[in-house]
Amino acid sequence: MSSIRIYNARILTMDAGTGIIDNGVLTTRDDRIAYLGSSDKEPRERSYDREIDAKGNLLMPGFKNAHTHSGMTFLRSFADDLPLDRWLNEAIFPREARLKDGDIYWCTKLAVMEYLTSGITACFDMYLKPYEIAKATEESGFRCVQVGGMNNFSQSLELQEEWFNELNGKNPLTSYMFGYHAEYTCSKELLEGLSKLAHKYGAPVWGHNSETASEVEGCKERYGLTPTEFADSLGLFDNGGGGYHCVYLSEHDMDIFEKRGLYVATNPGSNTKLASGTAPIARLLERGIGIGIGTDGPASNNCLDMFREMFLTTGLAKLREKDASAVDADKVLEMATAGSARAMGLTEADVLSEGKLADLIMIDLSKPEMRPLNNITKNLVYSGSKADVKLTMVGGKILYEDGRFNIGEDPEVIYNEVDKVIGAMKDI
Amino acid sequence: MSSIRIYNARILTMDAGTGIIDNGVLTTRDDRIAYLGSSDKEPRERSYDREIDAKGNLLMPGFKNAHTHSGMTFLRSFADDLPLDRWLNEAIFPREARLKDGDIYWCTKLAVMEYLTSGITACFDMYLKPYEIAKATEESGFRCVQVGGMNNFSQSLELQEEWFNELNGKNPLTSYMFGYHAEYTCSKELLEGLSKLAHKYGAPVWGHNSETASEVEGCKERYGLTPTEFADSLGLFDNGGGGYHCVYLSEHDMDIFEKRGLYVATNPGSNTKLASGTAPIARLLERGIGIGIGTDGPASNNCLDMFREMFLTTGLAKLREKDASAVDADKVLEMATAGSARAMGLTEADVLSEGKLADLIMIDLSKPEMRPLNNITKNLVYSGSKADVKLTMVGGKILYEDGRFNIGEDPEVIYNEVDKVIGAMKDI
């Protein structure tokens, strides 16, 4: 049984808003939070494997990355500044087709490293080779919810069912949800099959949804319905789920999101870099629709940085609404932590409280961009960066601390293996 | 005479595009670059005060922050998520009025710390108390070009002339340019006086320009001219200069920018957070108008982070143009380094070459977001962050290295003094 005690901390639990416990203590027992509160009420009944003086720094829930394709790290900065169709067809697809067994394992490990530096403690990952992804994240100690990316060209209903059964309930760090890539890459029959599968297990379903205006137009031409309406008409959302991106949702789409309790995973960095547009976050909030924040993959974003995404979530909403008060920092921090966690089914990792998973980070408040401490939430959302992440803990285990990784593998080995993956494709 | 030799470096000079010298060496002599090139051509005639193994990391010109109000650090996160008029009138102005002698000295030092962590080696600073700013930056070893922020309520022609004469030519780290706050805060007579002053010295003039749509409308109502047309009609731009923000420039305004050789200092972070709008960067580039990038002040942005500004410069342009290929990474990196330097009159600090000022940074290429090294420029612009800045050198002196500051003052002292500044205003 492992245990850690962190004392002399400011604690932002996100459990009831953004109030902060001063001079707080948090202890862990195995992968859970055992005690959380002020130091004077702490039960001092036992010893710990390690005690850490937080020196007044901030403990808070880790960020959860609600949409990503981790394994695409090998394509970072390989094909930027291109229109979306050329980017996909000329740069991405031919290289993904050349991936060999084991490649995604290494590329996922590189992504995990970056997540940890950004205070991300879990990701919602849609990519190829689910067993390689699970191996990479489990070995690293990282929490990963995988989701199907089935389409007409890869994956299948049979494989999704296998993965659903094999990747749920085996390792506490790993889970799996049903999903489809997007309406425009899936036949109606395939989606009907997925709906049956979801009903069989009473499970939610996720997919890319309304990322671009042309995607919505194409769906309307094919079916006379928006992507949300079409998916709902097939019963895909009968047990909940949600959509990534959701830049172009109609009010009727939002009715469906509300009625089915669907979540939006917003990806402002990717939507910006690919010139897709700006999601209607203020309106979604107004309607009470659950929102998480994701980075999307490192080939489109190109980084896996929740601080960038948080600033963009509020900033782009302010631009869209022409209102500097739109989507304030408290709401954004809620989305990046508890909002994403709930979208991903990680209800045990949404906030910091006793009995919840010890998935948390320490923010260094002694960096210049964090001073003065006029408002810590606003500092985090408006001036925070990766440089402020001092420690990242997943399931009670410290995986990143003061710039050093504790993920069972030397970073240089990971870098070299990923170099080999992209190096083998230079001839394309 | 001080000297440093940095070897085993990748060097991005920005001198002729974004090509990289592998296995490069850079040496300094006092505040200048003495040698820069491949290791095999290096003259090995003398010893150095210090030799640094760059271990393959990247040397490049420091970023220059082309618009800021450094001393506003005390107001960071004090008043966010407010409409612009309430932000200014209720939150900012009453507190600025309470600043005491010495306050801006400390608040500027806090800003310098943050600049250094973000790889910024010089700033173009418009704020109160120019002598305090000069003292703070010179003591820190930081390069600062100050610029007048004269308006109907503060500063004056006499003071600007005094500062112009006192702050130019005395300390190699410090210079001063003429400037006005904005058309809407200055009477016509005041601007006419500034034009005379600029003509007397043959000097360029800078001001806030077309930051919001309402600013442009107001100027048209008052004078039948845009802010650019109006300033130009008074002869303010006869010796060059430029404008901050420039979100709402007409084609005719751009004609004036072209004709007078004016620079745009774009501030995408601030324009986003205050919901002001998105500058026409793609069009400005197309017309060959010089562009620098600035953070604006820490009360509006709220951070002083060139990596955020670079991503926003390209990202918002892509959204505005609905084109993922708009304003590519090479152009953005050029703006943040040489573009800003030229705008600020720092032609000796624009690129890395022998004889130029040794204002440079080292980027840690061993961070996960920098791997693989498919394209270093794109890595910097699309996935770079403060966490990647390993070393910041200004005028041949290392001011920041591996998280530690060398600015002649303990960070904790600076933090405490800034806490006192804002602490004395909690009653407002």
Image: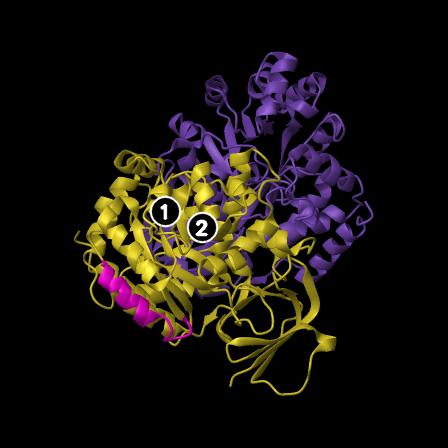
Chain colours: A purple, B yellow
Q: Which chain does the residue under circle 1 lie in?
A: B
Q: Is-magenta flag for residue B165?
A: yes
Give the residue at x 27% y 51%.
B191
Taking the image as drawn, is residue B266 in sight? yes
In contact (CB < 8 Å): disc 1 and disc 2: yes
Assign a secondary structure to mark 2: helix
State the residue position of label 2: B260
Q: Which chain does the residue under circle 2 lie in?
A: B
Between the C-alphas of marks 1 and 2, the distance is 9 Å
Which class describes the residues within 10 Å of circle 2: few (<14), some (14-19), or many (20+)? Answer: some
The outermost residue toward the left is: B427
Q: Which residues are magenta?
A: B155-173
Residue B331 in the image: state x and y as whole percent.
Answer: 58, 50
Taking the image as drawn, is residue A234 in sight? no
State the residue position of label 1: B232
Q: Is residue B334 above or below residue A83?
A: below
Residues at discs 1 and 2 both on one chain: yes
Q: Amino acid at mark 1?
A: Asp
Residue A268 in the image: state x and y as whole percent.
Answer: 52, 38
